[in-house]
Image: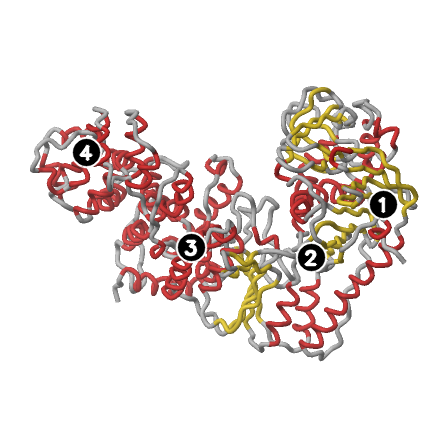
Amino acid sequence: MKTIFEKLNFTGLEIGRVQSVDEMTVVPILGGDRGNIAAPENVKFQKTTNYGTMVFENKDEFNPAIIPTNIMARGRGAQDHAMSGSAIVLKKSSGTFRNACCIEQSQGGYLNGAEEEDILPIALRKKLLSQKLRNQCSYNKLWEDIRVWLKGLHLTYSSAHLRYFYDEPNVKEALENFSAEFEPVAGQIGALIMFSGVPVGIEIMPSSKHWEHHWKLLIRGCYGAEMLRLKLLKKLQPSALVLPDIPDNSTPDQVMDILEDFSLHLRKEVLPILEAIDVKSRKIIARDTSVSMNTSLVRTTSGGGGDLITQNNVPVYVSLVL
Amino acid sequence: MTAKKVVKIDSGILQYIPKGAFYEGTDEQFSRVRQMWNDLFTHDRLLFCLTSLLNGSGFSKGAMSHILLRNPITGKEVLPPGLAFGYESDVIMYNLKKERVPRALKNLLMLTGTEGFRPINNARTRKIILEYIFNRSTDELDSLTINFKSKLKTLVRHALGKQNVFKILNGDTKLFMKWIGRYNKDVLPVFFHLFDRQPTTSGQSTYYKKIEQYWKLRTAAQNQDVAMFRLLMKGMPQRTVIGFRNTYKVPIELSEIYEQAKTSTKEKIQLESAAKRSGAKVKVNYKNQELYDLWKVFYYKLINNDTENIDKIKQAITDQYSKTDRIDIGECVVIIDASKSMVGSDQRPLHPFLTSLCLVTSLDNVKDVFYVGGKLIKVGAEDDHNVLIPANGTALWRGLIKAVKTGVENIVIISDGYENEVKGMFEHTYNYFKNNAHKINILHLNPVFSADAKTGTVRRLAADIDPMPLTNYKYLETELIFKRMINHSASVKKLLIQKYQKLLGGHQ
């Protein structure tokens, strides 16, 4: 059977050593760099020029940049924003995206740079899988979903301010602690993320440099935030991971064998999970012919989906919430 | 009857370093450390004083000296054998002399009311300030005065009072001899210089060449005499030269000053890259640098693919290693966490990992060292340098099994306590060995201390292994002593008196 990566035409990928902390498991995806994509440090969020309009700048001299799916920018005294999907910005230029979402309902003002960046939590990303909603140029299109997402968390106010969640001191500390638990490994370009053994996301960046740059935004802002919310709402199953028994009187060498087997077993278990993820549809939603890049919206049979970007028909980036 | 207060202290009282908001009185951490200082002082003044002989931060020692100096000695205290009546002043002076001069002066300035401390002025503070400044050779004093003019001025004025300063400046030699001349009768030009009066007679300045040069340099700067300025700036402190250049707008390139003016060896290593950016060629003497700074510059250079002077730095590390006083906790093996998180924060990159490398050199009797995680990188034109850098996930259990296999009981683990391949696996493995008649004694040193960590507390690896927070490798002995401080006061006191005798010469 083919894994989801093979179904999406990714090649040269390997599974790294499984990292698991409490209910969250991060399976590193290892592989070589792919495509000619701008270095992440050359790309930054510049400003909002109107409610619902985000501007990114790509200073790279040679290559186009990929703006990761649903990246959000937060800053004081201005309306926080998030992208409705991923985006491409050509070399040495700025890209203006008018279908972005305001994520701070009653705050006025335009952003000039971001104080903090994150990726939207899973549930909100799933809402933006609707192509209609995604393309809609309406700054308030996510407010109702944000309000629902925040419901039950007992935050001080009830408006659709995503910032209430991220700024709440206990949440902030928990997210920082949580992201510190995981570490990017050498050659890592992506990850499969699972909650209590259930896959919730697949991320692949064009290079390990891109992964190093963005992993914290994903682990903290997207997956960590969603997991913390589910825990607060008591909707998350406890971790099912059971450590192996070590028989009495085992020698250190035997202990090493038992634990290495267990570690290997965890990696092997990932394969059927990757094979079980199926693509329901795949549709090109944006073509940047000058750089031979296409963006496709992928939908999975489990009701999830996300963006797949190819360059010269070779996949270089994917971000799926499952 | 009131119950005896339980004293809770930890080595934070010696390791504390104020940062940013910590200067504010309301800061929680500062209040907590201040409370611990006061608790230990009230619990046992002698123990409090002798504790400051252990390695610690300059700031903490300054604060502890401040507490000692603001509380008068009654003279009724019974001193244990080995200590003389003036031992407190001896300890304070010893600590001041052990610090680098800028830190020592900051500690003295605490007595004037800086860094959030109350000003104190009494016979003991006066003696300590004046003795520290003036009881030194002419050459030392010449250079001290040039480098720290305004700080010294503040201190001398605080110690003597404005009235006495005025009298000495106006020729009261009796007063001068009483307070200052007792240490060195030839220091009047220094005194004049500190209070911004150019020493008048040519004969006076002959002992103080740098002071004379300072005044000439200043005149050259005022007169915009670039040629003379260029000539005189050689060997003068870089800060002074840059100060004159900027104040009097002397048209001279900054890179020229970086090359010609003088900096301390510590400053030199810090300014190396800034000087390089300005185009200047600066020669750094790595021999006298601290081990931590050497490792730091070694890693920074290699990570940036700069192999210039790498062999010199390697040699300096080896030399420092051979000079380091090592602590013997018995035969041990060391596990170093080299996973990605040991790279540290953006504010102090690589700090946990560099501290780990230094900690290994502080231990004696190390049978083996095991690294967990990490990645080898090759640097240089011909890949001639192999360097291990923090990378990958954390599987400390692998290191533990390797350590147990050596058969050595004492296992030192240097780790931030975060474990992810998978979480809980270390404790699982440790519990197995512990419950299966393997004699192991684990010492967990954690270089990611809560005061530095954004995320809060020091992490533990297993329920019954207390982590020992260590942000500086020099504090290892301090930490080991503090673990026994309150419950074994008598034995710790004995140990500290021995240390006092060894360091300061004792009274049998």
What amino acid is at disc 1?
Answer: Leu
Label 1 chain ID: A
How far apart marks 4 and 1 lie (CA) works out to 75 Å
Secondary structure, mark 2, is loop
Tag 2 near tag 4, CB within 8 Å? no
Q: In the rendered image, which residue does mark 2 sit on?
A: B420
What amino acid is at disc 3?
Answer: Leu
B72 or B318: which is nearer to us?
B318
10 Å neighbourhood of mark 3: few (<14), some, or many (≥20)?
Answer: many
In the image, which is nearer the foreground, mark 4 or mark 3?
A: 3
Mark 4 vs mark 1: tell me if same chain.
Answer: no
In the depicted structure, whether residue A73 falls above or below residue B430: above
In the image, which is nearer the foreground, mark 2 or mark 1?
A: 1
Label 2 chain ID: B
**x and y percentages locating residue B247 in the rendered image:** 30, 26
A126 or A42: which is nearer to us?
A42
Secondary structure, mark 1, is loop
10 Å neighbourhood of mark 4: few (<14), some, or many (≥20)?
Answer: many
What amino acid is at disc 4?
Answer: His
Tag 2 near tag 1, CB within 8 Å? no
Q: Is residue A166 left or right of residue B118?
A: right
Looking at the image, tell me whether mark 2 or mark 3 is earlier in sequence order.
3
Secondary structure, mark 3, is helix
Mark carried by residue A322: 1
Q: In the rendered image, which residue does mark 3 sit on?
A: B294
Q: Is residue B107 left or right of residue A209?
A: left
Q: In the rendered image, which residue does mark 4 sit on?
A: B193
